[in-house]
Image: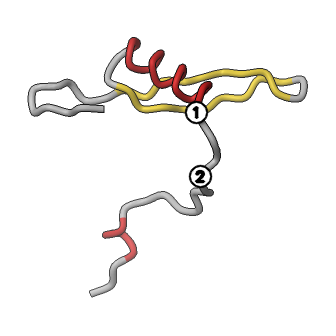
Amino acid sequence: MKRHDFSPEPSTFMIDYPYEGSTRTVYIVAEDWEDAQAQLSALQAFGHIEGELVEVGDIASVMVN
């Protein structure tokens, strides 16, 4: 995704899919609806699990003086 100083902030888009009798949701960050659609197409064609996210947060919050 190309970013420029004048580009709007990206948005988070939800992708719903059926799984084992319920609906699951994953999130992608994209510049706009068309970018989200393009990323979904790429995910369908080439996506694979790369790893597991184990923690999310601001690293400054865990730093000690």
- Rendered residue at 40%/13% (across/down): 33
Q: Determine whether, in the image, residue 60 is placed left or right of residue 46.
A: left
Q: What residue occupies the far left of the structure in this picture? A: 6
Residue type at the position of mark 2: Glu
Q: Position of residue 9 (x, y in %)?
A: 25, 29
Q: Position of residue 29 (x, y in %)?
A: 41, 32
Residue nearest the observer in this picture, 3 or 22: 3
- Rendered residue at 49%/58% (across/down): 56
Q: Determine whether, in the image, residue 3 is placed left or right of residue 63.
A: left
Q: Label 2: state its secondary structure.
A: loop
Q: Within 10 angstroms of label 1, few (less than 14), some, or many (20 or more) residues?
A: few
- Quadrant that contains the N terminus: top left
- Rendered residue at 39%/75% (across/down): 62
- Quadrant that contains the C terminus: bottom left
Q: Within 10 angstroms of label 2, few (less than 14), some, or many (20 or more) residues?
A: few
Q: Quadrant of residue 26?
A: top right
How far is disc 2 from disc 1 in space, using C-alphas? 12 Å
Q: Determine whether, in the image, residue 31 is placed left or right of residue 18.
A: left
Residue nearest the observer in this picture, 25 or 63: 25
Residue type at the position of mark 1: Phe
Q: Which residue is mark 1?
A: 46
Q: What residue occupies the far right of the structure in this picture? A: 21
Q: Is residue 3 above or below residue 36?
A: below
Q: What residue occupies the far bottom of the structure in this picture? A: 65
Q: Is residue 55 above or below residue 38?
A: below
Q: Quadrant of residue 17?
A: top right
Q: Which residue is mark 2?
A: 50
- Rendered residue at 47%/25% (across/down): 39
Q: Determine whether, in the image, residue 40 is placed left or right of residue 65.
A: right
Q: Position of residue 40 (x, y in %)?
A: 53, 22
